Image (tube, helix red, strand yellow):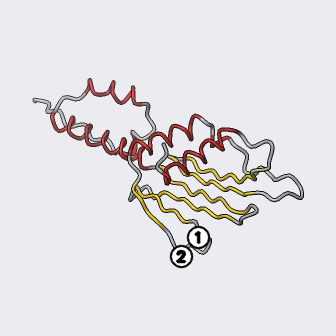
């Protein structure tokens, strides 16, 4: 009796959390063109998923001039939506290119956003600008709020906010 090798069919979600090196090593075990096609399609899916699994909403409001800024990112359309109108009646949209998206993801990771406190309170009896940043990236979700007068706000948090604001001004 001759044994016929069946294509290796593994559910897509079983690879999601494996290191890339292990996935690349597994290439050496692929025997058929169908297996290779499946593997390549899956890797493309994972790379696309990882690039588009970032969403955020940044709000800045208050101060002496009662300023307001809202910037959000929709990962499905890869579109930034922003407004300086507190009512939300007047918004603008622009696409976010892959390079800027990668730079922002890198800043979020390198500046340790997901380990920041949830609140950095203002100094008493001062006028301040409040900022709120909520980010969902991969399987992580975190929100932090801070006042510009708070002394303990990490520099990295301010850097991420500046990177987000640069996305709408084009000053990269």
Residue 120: mark in rendering: none
Q: In the rendered structure, are the residues bearing label 2 and label 1 in contact, judged by CB atoms less than 8 Å apart?
A: yes
Where residue 72 appears, as percent x and y from the top left, is: 52, 59
Quarter of the figure with the N terminus: top left
Q: Quadrant of residue 134?
A: bottom right
Q: Quadrant of residue 93?
A: bottom left
Residue corresponding to mark 2: 89
For residue 6, side relative to residue 10 (left or right): left
Q: Nearer the viewer, residue 122 or 14?
A: 122
Residue at 65%, 59% in the rendered image: 60
Where residue 39 appears, as percent x and y from the top left, is: 27, 37
Residue at 53%, 47% in the rendered image: 139
Q: Residue furthest left?
A: 1
Q: Quadrant of residue 14?
A: top left
Q: Residue furthest front?
A: 65
Residue at 72%, 64% in the rendered image: 65
Q: Nearer the viewer, residue 36 or 110?
A: 110
Where residue 43 appears, as percent x and y from the top left, is: 32, 39
- Is residue 81 placed above or below 86 in the rendered structure? above
Q: Residues within 10 Å of mark 1 (few under 14, many from 20)?
A: few
**Residue at mark 2 to residue at mark 1: CA–CA distance:** 7 Å
For residue 113, side relative to residue 82 (left or right): right
- Is residue 78 placed above or below 39 in the rendered structure? below
Q: Nearer the viewer, residue 116 or 157?
A: 157
Where residue 151 appears, as percent x and y from the top left, is: 81, 43
Residue 85: mark in rendering: 1
For residue 71, side relative to residue 126 (left or right): left
**SS for tag 1?**
loop
């Amino acid at each position: 009796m001759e044994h016929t090798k069946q294509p290796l069919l593994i559910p897509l979600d079983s690879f999601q959390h494996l290191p890339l090196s292990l996935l690349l090593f597994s290439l050496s075990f692929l025997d058929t063109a169908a297996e290779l096609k499946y593997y390549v399609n899956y890797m493309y899916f994972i790379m696309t998923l990882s690039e588009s699994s970032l969403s955020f909403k940044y709000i800045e409001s208050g101060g002496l001039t009662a300023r307001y800024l809202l910037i959000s990112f929709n990962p499905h359309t890869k579109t930034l939506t922003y407004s300086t109108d507190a009512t939300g009646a007047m918004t603008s949209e622009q696409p976010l290119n892959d390079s800027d998206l990668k730079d922002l993801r890198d800043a979020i990771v390198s500046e340790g956003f997901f380990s920041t406190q949830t609140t950095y309170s203002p100094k008493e009896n001062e006028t301040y600008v409040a900022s709120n940043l909520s980010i969902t990236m991969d399987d992580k979700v975190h929100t932090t709020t801070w006042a510009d007068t708070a002394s303990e706000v990490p520099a990295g948090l301010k850097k991420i906010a500046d990177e987000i604001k640069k996305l709408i001004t084009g000053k990269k």
